[in-house]
Image (cartoon, coloured by chain):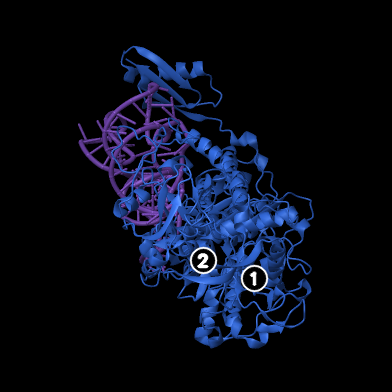
Chain colours: A blue, B purple
Amino acid sequence: MSPNTDQPTQRAALDVQAVQEKWLPVWTELDPFRAIDDGARERRYALTMFSYPSGDLHMGHGEVFALHDVLARYWFQRGYDVLNPIGWDSFGLPAENAAIKRNEHPAIYTYANIATQAESLRRYAMSFDWSTRLHTSDPEYYRWTQWLFLRFYERGLAYRKASRVNWCPNDQTVLANEQVVGGMCERCGAVVTKRQLTQWYFRITAYAQQLLDDMALLEDHWPAPILTMQRNWIGRSEGAFIDFPVEGRDEPIRVFTTRQDTLFGATFMVVAPESSLAKRLCAPEQEDALAAYLEQVNRSTEVERLAIEQPKTGVFLGAYAVNPATGQRIPVYAADYVLADYGTGSIMAVPGQDQRDWDFAESHDLPIVRTVQPPDSFDGKAYNGAGSAINSANDEVSLDGLPVDQAKARITTWLTANGHGEGTVNFRLRDWLLSRQRYWGCPIPIVHCEDCGEVPVPDDELPVVLPDLRGQDLAPKGTSPLAAATEWVETTCPKCGRPARRDSDTMDTFVDSSWYFLRYCSPGKKDGPFDPEAANRWMPAANYFGGAEHAVLHLLYFRFFTKVLHDMGMLDAVEPTRSLINQGQVINRGRSMSKSLGNGVDLGEQIDNYGVDAVRLTMVFAGPPEDDIDWADMSPGGSVRFLQRAWRLAGDVSSQPGVDFGRGDLALRKATHRAVHEATELIEAFRFNVMVARVMELVNVTRKAIDSGCGPDDPAVREAVEAVAIMLSLVAPYTAEEMWEQLGHQPTVAKAGWPKIDESLVVPDSVTCVIQVGGRVRARLEVTPDVTETELERLALAHPNVRRAIDGMPIRMVIVRAPKLVNVVVG
RNA sequence: GCCAGAGUGGUGGAAUGGCAGACACGCCGGCUUUAGGUGCCGGUGCCCUUUGGGUGUGAGGGUUCGAAUCCCUCCUCUGGCACCA
């Protein structure tokens, strides 16, 4: 007879939607997730990338917030003082584009979406401290973005310069290098062109070395790919500047090279065609040729330039330089394989040791000299490997016979001693272009005065508030929409009082997001961007959840800001977050969700169908946090069924709250304590999917105990179900709360406290020992964990299966790994 | 092209030197049910005639008593970089 025959035929089912409506107001009332910040307990700052308010939350939000909340809620359960703040990155182009289309103000779209997302986040049961809430587009926030800009300006870290900059013809604004991906606009995908413009920059290059060095603090705590990408982006290389005198000119050509040891093989020079140096060097009879070449270069897009295997083109400038090592007269070319914005924009060409120079030399009939002896096996053209220097000597210095490293050192000494150059370190990183010719961003607090030049807006006049523009006033026209707001732009100079014009550009929205995590530490602070003492109590954040797409954008910028603020004495921390997790993407049927593919999945619909808990559980259980989730492979219905099963356990418990667990069924108690023990370790290691599996196992074991074991009134059953409720509260807050209530407790389970582990119950009292003969499993023994090796060997050899497998063959050795394994090697 | 990382059942994934496939999804069978998008029980890598045996973690080789795990070669996929002097 089945033990279930007397069960009611109609099983109770948890009405997920009703439960959501039941608990939401209770939690709002209890407000359990406020940071306490009284020093009574250890603090933990749980940070997750704030949201951009373009419409409601999508599946990606669902994933990252579910994962982040497991950790934050775990910390709450562990009794830490948790700061788990929330805000919106609410300046930006989508709102502006929507405003143009709808002929309204961007704030309408922005704040409507924020309201929608906020409601969704509450329904999603995020354990946020809502008192920290901020929006970067609020004047009380961007006032301090402006204040920080001015502090950077005072320190020479914000400056204006004319330069050829990246221009997105679609968004009608300039872009930072970091926002150009493969020659295209990171945001809209349009092919980026170049424009000569005077723009504002942050001097992030001043922090290049420190950004690199401090990665030592992040090693093993940040994903390795992110660190690699930042390293590559910063692109440190050691080498030398070398000055090449130019015939008939006082100004030499300065080059940067990492292979100063190959100087004797420099048989020509190349300068970037668009550089001013090219123009200055160009002989009158070559001017037409240079102009024609420049036109050709400018016609080709960045994308074409990046295409593989282009021929090396260029023009002779009619100028000659002198190789300082050989004294030889060498021609100077302009060619687009030399980039204007790397190094000095000019190179010494050593075709013998550089394939690009080789290709150019071949097509322009230029001499090739080898200065490093290639190995006999080398059958290529330019040789850039290790080897001894050859053909590298003059009256004063000889490199011949030296390996590359020593040759570099010797020639650098010679260059320095003779005033031909010096050793140096070069970075690929460029300064951060922060001006944007768009409306919906933070105005740059500078006034341009004909007499006084650029004048900072005084602190007490901040914020410089955006003028009220809407609809077509915002349409991109190549200059900032703010420039057309005459009344706003026309002002008086703070210094001399005469008429002056406001800077009409706004800041890159990545500036807004470079310090929001600091304002979270002292929400709404009136007399500063943040309270340094509060920031020092919380920073660095214990963990940061967010997408890998910000590898060399936000994740670089916020490190930069942190370092500057540290140097300003406003912050002890030198890094913003101690650890970082990049969650994977939620995809569908093997592809990113997109309208054109028609494979979009709506988070709200999933929640309506399965409930918040099941959607969150599905996200967390899908796999490791950093892996992509293909929603087509997931079964939120399975999550619903598991949650129902867990919930029914609570209804079955018939002992009273507070019952002495010590008198409970030992086997179940051990299962419970082991499950909690393992779950704890798994969460600490961010292995949330396996943690869920352990909770599922405990649910299964408890079900059996109730139905066909110790029965529903055993104290161990209550202990197990309470542990399930608490562990489940990290993933499925509604179900857990409902269970907690059924178990006779007061809300909220979120603050019930992590179950205490009795270590003596974690150690199993018997272990399955595997007995192998020749590496194959032939028997299993149940043994005590402290069984001795001798005893185990005796037991193993006595086992009939083992004797049969040995079959009289001589025993060569016996490997004993008590208590888990014995391997008998025969023959 | 260069540099990382990864390849495990029908599917998502466990196991990181010691019982491969935990936990789920799906599927098969049974019970309960008027019914099932419910619940419960059993089964489920593949092969062989079993309550037994063989075989199996992309392919091939190596180290080891023992390899999904460590090493080498190759293949495939993913990510990053890609005229950076």
According to the image, label 1 marks what residue? A136
Is B18 or A92 nearer to us in this picture? A92
How far is disc 1 from disc 2 in space, using C-alphas?
Answer: 31 Å
Q: Chain of mark 2?
A: A
Q: Chain of mark 1?
A: A
Relative to residue A445, is residue A345 drawn left or right? left
Q: Secondary structure at mark 1?
A: loop
**Considering only vertical position in the picture, is A648 above or below A141?**
above
The x, y position of residue A471, in whole percent, is 54, 87
Residue beneath the point at 36% across and 13% down? A811
Is A405 or A802 nearer to us in this picture? A405
Is B28 or A770 nearer to us in this picture? A770
Using the rendered view, name the quadrant where residue A587 is placed.
bottom left
Q: Residues within 10 Å of mark 1 (few under 14, many from 20)?
A: many
Using the rendered view, name the quadrant where residue A34 is placed.
bottom right
Relative to residue A758, is residue A702 drawn left or right? left
Q: Residues within 10 Å of mark 2 (few under 14, many from 20)?
A: many
Q: Earlier in the sequence, mark 1 or mark 2?
A: 1
The answer to whether the residue labelled 1 contacts the one labelled 2, judged by CB atoms less than 8 Å apart, is no
Looking at the image, is mark 1 or mark 2 nearer the viewer?
Answer: 1
The x, y position of residue A234, in whole percent, is 54, 52
Q: Secondary structure at mark 2?
A: loop
Q: Quarter of the image containing the C terminus of chain A? A: top left
The x, y position of residue A33, in whole percent, is 69, 60
Amino acid under disc 2: Gly
Residue beneath the point at 63% across and 41% down? A664
For residue A611, the mark is 2
The x, y position of residue A693, in whole percent, is 50, 48
Amino acid under disc 1: Thr
